[in-house]
Image (cartoon, rainbow, N blue to C red):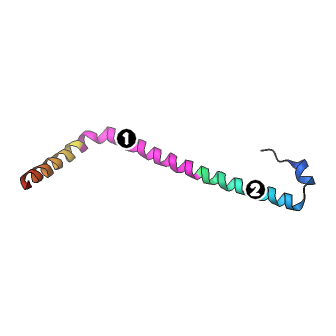
Amino acid sequence: MTIPLQYLMGVSNDGLERFALKRMADAANLRKEAKAIEQEAIETEMEARVGYWLLENRDELLRAVGSHLERIEDVGESAA
């Protein structure tokens, strides 16, 4: 945004105050949006890292979980 100096030089003190308050509110809103975007970027990167981790470890994880799941299923079947 280009600062409207000609307008600001001729506006009343109330007008200057409204202008300053409006720009401060705009800055606060932009910071809020930036924080939300940053948080989304962090979460997206974490999901990508989980994906890469699974690429490297999925087979081992499935073997480990699979053996535990088989035992849980055996217990469930014997209880039924």
Q: Nearer the viewer, residue 74 or 39?
A: 74
**Residue at x-position 93% and y-position 53%:** 10
Residue 22 badge: 2
Tell me where residue 12 appears, x and y as whole percent.
Answer: 90, 59
**Residue sitting farthest toward the left:** 78
Tell me where residue 78 appears, x and y as whole percent.
Answer: 6, 53
Q: Amino acid at mark 1?
A: Gly
Q: Is residue 75 magenta?
A: no
Q: Which residues are magenta?
A: 35-61
> Rounded to the nearest whole Å, what is the CA distance between mark 2 and mark 1?
43 Å
Say whether residue 61 is left or right of residue 3.
left
The picture quadrant where one finds residue 22 is: bottom right
Q: Nearer the viewer, residue 58 or 1?
A: 1
Tell me where residue 66 appears, x and y as whole percent.
Answer: 18, 45
**Residue at x-position 89% and y-position 50%:** 7
* Residue 49 in the image: above or below residue 8: above
Say whether residue 64 is left or right of residue 13.
left
Q: Disc 2 vs disc 1: which is toward the camera?
A: 2
**Residue sitting farthest toward the right:** 10
Q: Quadrant of the N terminus?
A: top right
Query: How many residues crowd around disc 2 within 10 Å: few (fewer than 14), some, or many (20 or more)?
Result: few
Residue 51 badge: 1
**Residue at x-position 25% and y-position 39%:** 59
Residue 35 badge: none
Tell me where residue 45 appears, x and y as whole percent.
Answer: 46, 44
Say whether residue 64 is left or right of residue 54.
left
Say whether residue 38 is left or right of residue 74.
right
Q: Amino acid at mark 2?
A: Lys
Q: Nearer the viewer, residue 56 or 51?
A: 51
**Residue at x-position 65% and y-position 51%:** 30
Which SS does the magenta portion mostly show? helix
